Image (cartoon, rainbow, N blue to C red):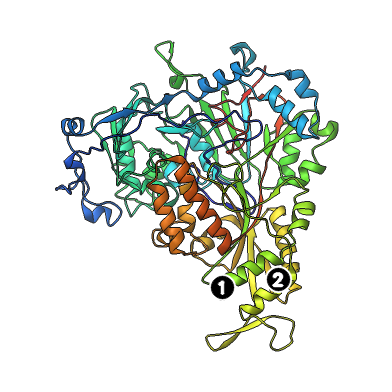
C-alpha cells in the first residue's frame, strides 16, 4: 500500500492532507519511538561517477527540459565500490502496533466502551481504549465485511499521478504501493510488504532498496524496480502536468533500476529531508511507456481512457467500480496476501472497500445514522447538537483526538490591500477570535498560534500569544499604513499609484463548509466596524484551488495539515516556491525565512533542526501572511461494528482503512 506524503491543500475547512512528524505527547497516542536509525555517518563517500555530469544522458535534455539534468548512473560495481552503506529499518507497521498494544493492555472492555456516550475527555479516552485495538484473534474479524468510507469530494480519476485530493489518496492507498511510510509516532521506515532491504549511503546522497519478488499488477505482470524508475521519469517529464505528485519528487536527482529488484535513489545533495521525497505512486511501465508520448495529459488517448475504466493497479485492492460523483468500489486481491497456498502478507481486514461520495453534510450524517456509511468526520455543530441520544448511539459512537492541522485566512501579499504587514496585523486584531472559538467552533478547537502545533517537536518552546480582538489597535495600524476615510463615505481609502483605492476586497472560502461560511461572515462584520468592506464569496473547491495557484484572490479562508517533516512547508513560504510551482499562494517572500529553510534541510541533529524551524515559526507569526484561526481537532463518528481506530497527528487511522488497523467485528 502506498502511504503518500500528504501535502495537499485544505480548503473550506476540509483538510486534504496531514502527514506529520514528531508526535511527542498526543492524547490517546503511544509515546514517540526513537529516530529511524542510530547509524551515524562518519566518512562521506560518493562514487565519482555519481557526481560527474556524464554523457550521453539517460533522457535527452529536449525531452525533460529544465526538470532533469543529464545524468548517467554509475554501474553496479562502481556503486558498490564507491559507496559505504548503513542499514535502515524495514518494518511491518501492524506488527509494531500489535507489540505496543500487547505491552499496553486495555482497561476498558469493548462492552463498556460501546455503552458510553462521549460527553467528556475521560469518556473519550475510555472509548478509544476499548475500541481502538487490533483483534486478539482472527475469529473476531468479519472477513467478508465491507468498509463504507465517506468522502465529501469526488475522486478525480484512477491514474495515481493525477491525484490532487484526499479522496484520490484514499484510492491510491488501497490500490498502490510505496517504498516508505511512517508509524503512528511518525518514525520513517521501509514497508516490509514491498521492500526486503533499505540502505543509505553514509553521505546520505543515495538510498538503495531491494524489492520483494512477489508483487504483481492486477493483469498478472510482476512489479519491478523498472516501474519505479519509469514512473519517476514520467513525473519529471515537463509535458506531464502532475504538480501535486511532483512536489518532493522534483528534489530527487535520479531513480535507477539496476535489475528487476534493485532500485537506487540519487539525491541532489545530502539533506535531512531526503527521506521524505522517496515514496511516490507508481504506474505500470509496460502499459504507459508507449502511451505517454502520444498523450502526456494522461487523460485523452484511447489507452488512457481504457485505464480509467479498468485500471491496472498493484496494491492490496483492485478497482471494480468507479462511478464519478457517487462511489468507488474496491475488492481485496487474494494474490496480494497468498501465493501457492501460503500466506505472504497480512490479509486485509475488509473484503470490499467502498468510498462513498456525499457532498452535503446533513445527507452524510443521515447516511451514518442509517448505517449506509461506517465513518464520518464531524464539525463542531453536529458533534454538539446532532450526535447524541439513542438515534445516534443506537448504531454509532464518536471520538476525538489531536490532529496537527490549522485553519487560517490567507492574504495575497502582493495585492494593494495586504502588501503592508501593518494591514495584515490589523486584520488579525480586528477579528473576534473569542466569538469564533466559543460560538462557531463550540469551544472544541484551540486558538492557533502559528504553523506548528504546540505538541510538535519543532514548535517554539514559548508559543506566540494568540491574537484577541482589539479594534482600537487595528484602527491605529490601518492609519499608520495610510488607510483613512478621506471622503467620509464610511469606507477607508488610500492613494495608490496616483489613484484613490477603496478598501473593498473579496474573501473566498470553499463552498459547502458551514464553519468557513460563518467565520467569513463574522470577519466581514468585524471589518465593517473599521470601515473595510469585505465581500464574502463561496467558491467551488476546484475553482478555489485554481484561483489560489494563480494568485487570483485578495484573501481566502482555508486550512493546512503539517507534513512528514517541518521542511515540507517550504513550498508555502519560500521565494523559491513562487518560481517552481509550489503552493506559496500568498506570494510571501522573506530572505530570512528562505535562508532558515535552507539551513533546516542541511542540519541532521534533531535538536538543532528544531531551533531552526522555531525561528521560522516566530518570523511567520511576526509577518502575519496568514491570520491563524484555530488548531482543528480530529472528531469522528464510527459505526459500532468498527474497531481499531487510534489517533496520531494524522487523524484516527493507522495506515489506511482496509489495509491497517481498522476492522469490523463479527
Tell me whether circle 1 and circle 2 mark residues in contact (CB < 8 Å).
no
Residue holding disc 1: 420
- Residue 640 in percent (x, y) is at 72, 26
Number of labels in the image equals 2
1 or 2: tag closer to the N-terminus: 1
- The answer to whether any part of residue 299 appears in the image is no
Furthest-right residue in this view: 389
Of badges 1 and 2, the one in the foreground is 2
Q: Residues within 10 Å of mark 1 (few under 14, many from 20)?
A: some
- Residue 184 in percent (x, y) is at 55, 31
- Where is residue 221, by image quadrant? top left
From the viewer's perspective, tell me whether residue 640 is left or right of residue 5.
right
Q: Is residue 496 above or below residue 52?
A: below
- Residue 503 in percent (x, y) is at 65, 77
The mark found on residue 473 in the picture is 2
Q: CA distance from mark 1 to mark 2?
A: 15 Å
Looking at the rendered image, the quarter that the C terminus falls into is top right
- Residue 50 in percent (x, y) is at 20, 42
- Where is residue 288, by image quadrant? top left
Q: Secondary structure at mark 2?
A: helix
Residue drawn at (36%, 49%) of the image: 250
Q: Is residue 14 above or below residue 86?
A: below
Q: Residues within 10 Å of mark 2 (few under 14, many from 20)?
A: some
Amino acid at each position: 500500500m502506498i502511504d503518500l506524503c500528504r501535502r495537499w491543500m485544505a480548503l473550506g475547512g476540509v483538510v486534504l492532507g496531514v502527514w506529520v512528524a514528531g508526535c511527542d505527547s498526543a492524547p490517546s497516542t503511544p509515546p514517540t519511538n526513537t529516530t529511524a536509525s542510530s547509524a551515524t555517518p562518519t566518512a562521506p563517500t560518493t562514487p565519482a561517477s555519481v557526481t560527474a555530469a556524464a554523457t550521453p544522458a539517460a533522457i535527452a535534455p529536449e525531452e525533460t527540459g529544465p526538470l532533469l539534468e543529464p545524468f548517467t548512473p554509475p554501474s553496479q560495481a562502481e556503486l558498490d565500490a564507491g559507496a559505504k552503506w548503513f542499514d535502515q529499518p524495514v518494518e511491518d507497521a501492524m506488527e509494531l502496533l500489535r507489540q505496543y498494544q500487547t505491552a499496553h493492555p486495555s482497561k476498558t472492555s469493548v462492552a463498556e466502551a460501546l455503552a458510553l456516550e462521549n460527553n467528556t475527555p475521560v469518556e473519550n479516552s475510555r472509548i478509544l481504549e476499548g475500541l481502538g485495538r487490533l483483534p486478539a484473534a482472527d475469529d473476531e474479524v468479519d472477513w467478508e465485511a465491507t468498509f463504507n468510507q465517506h468522502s465529501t469530494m469526488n475522486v478525480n480519476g484512477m491514474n495515481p499521478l493525477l491525484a490532487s485530493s484526499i479522496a484520490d489518496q484514499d484510492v491510491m492507498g488501497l490500490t498502490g504501493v510505496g517504498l516508505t511510510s511512517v508509524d503512528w509516532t511518525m518514525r520513517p521506515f521501509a514497508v516490509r510488504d514491498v521492500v526486503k532491504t533499505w540502505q543509505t549511503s553514509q553521505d546520505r546522497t543515495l538510498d538503495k532498496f531491494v524489492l520483494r519478488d512477489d508483487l504483481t499488477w492486477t493483469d498478472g505482470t510482476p512489479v519491478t524496480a523498472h516501474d519505479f524508475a519509469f514512473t519517476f521519469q514520467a513525473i519529471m517529464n515537463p509535458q506531464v502536468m502532475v504538480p501535486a505528485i511532483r512536489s518532493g519528487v522534483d528534489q530527487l536527482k535520479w531513480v535507477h533500476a539496476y535489475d528487476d529488484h534493485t532500485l537506487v535513489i540519487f539525491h541532489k545533495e545530502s539533506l535531512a529531508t531526503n527521506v521524505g521525497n522517496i515514496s511516490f505512486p507508481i504506474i505500470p511501465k509496460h502499459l504507459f511507456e508507449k502511451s505517454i508520448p502520444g498523450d502526456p495529459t494522461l487523460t485523452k488517448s484511447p489507452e488512457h481512457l481504457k485505464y480509467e475504466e479498468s485500471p491496472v493497479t498493484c496494491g492490496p485492492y483492485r478497482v471494480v467500480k468507479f462511478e464519478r460523483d457517487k462511489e468507488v468500489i474496491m475488492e481485496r486481491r487474494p494474490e496480494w496476501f497468498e501465493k501457492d497456498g501460503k500466506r505472504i502478507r497480512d490479509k486485509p481486514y475488509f473484503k470490499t472497500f467502498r468510498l462513498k461520495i456525499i457532498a452535503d453534510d446533513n445527507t452524510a450524517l443521515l447516511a451514518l445514522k442509517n448505517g449506509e456509511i461506517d465513518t464520518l468526520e464531524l464539525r463542531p455543530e453536529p458533534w454538539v447538537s446532532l450526535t447524541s441520544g439513542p438515534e445516534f448511539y443506537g448504531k454509532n459512537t464518536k471520538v476525538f483526538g489531536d490532529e496537527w492541522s490549522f485553519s487560517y485566512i490567507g492574504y495575497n501579499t502582493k495585492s494593494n490591500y495586504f502588501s503592508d504587514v501593518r494591514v495584515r496585523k490589523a486584520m488579525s486584531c480586528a477579528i473576534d477570535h473569542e466569538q469564533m472559538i466559543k460560538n462557531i467552533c463550540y469551544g472544541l478547537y484551540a486558538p492557533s498560534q502559528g504553523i506548528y502545533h504546540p505538541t510538535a517537536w519543532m514548535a517554539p518552546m514559548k508559543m506566540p500569544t494568540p491574537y484577541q480582538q482589539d479594534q482600537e489597535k487595528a484602527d491605529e495600524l490601518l492609519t499608520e499604513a495610510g488607510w483613512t476615510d478621506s471622503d467620509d463615505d464610511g469606507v477607508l481609502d488610500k492613494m495608490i499609484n496616483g489613484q484613490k483605492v477603496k478598501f473593498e476586497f473579496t474573501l473566498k472560502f470553499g463552498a459547502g463548509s458551514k464553519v468557513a461560511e460563518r467565520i467569513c461572515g463574522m470577519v466581514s462584520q468585524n471589518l465593517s466596524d473599521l470601515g473595510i468592506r469585505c465581500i464574502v464569496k463561496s467558491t467551488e473547491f476546484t475553482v478555489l484551488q485554481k484561483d489560489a495557484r494563480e494568485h487570483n484572490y485578495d484573501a481566502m479562508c482555508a486550512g493546512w495539515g503539517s507534513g512528514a517533516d517541518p521542511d515540507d512547508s517550504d513550498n508555502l513560504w519560500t521565494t523559491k516556491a513562487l518560481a517552481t510551482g509550489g503552493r506559496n499562494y500568498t506570494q510571501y517572500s522573506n530572505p530570512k525565512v528562505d535562508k532558515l529553510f535552507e539551513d533546516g534541510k542541511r542540519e541532521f541533529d534533531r535538536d538543532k533542526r528544531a531551533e531552526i524551524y522555531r525561528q521560522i515559526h516566530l518570523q511567520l507569526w511576526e509577518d502575519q501572511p496568514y491570520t491563524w484561526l484555530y488548531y482543528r481537532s480530529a472528531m469522528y463518528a464510527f459505526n459500532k461494528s468498527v474497531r481499531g481506530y487510534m489517533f496520531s497527528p494524522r487523524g484516527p487511522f493507522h495506515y489506511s482503512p482496509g489495509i491497517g488497523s481498522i476492522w469490523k467485528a463479527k
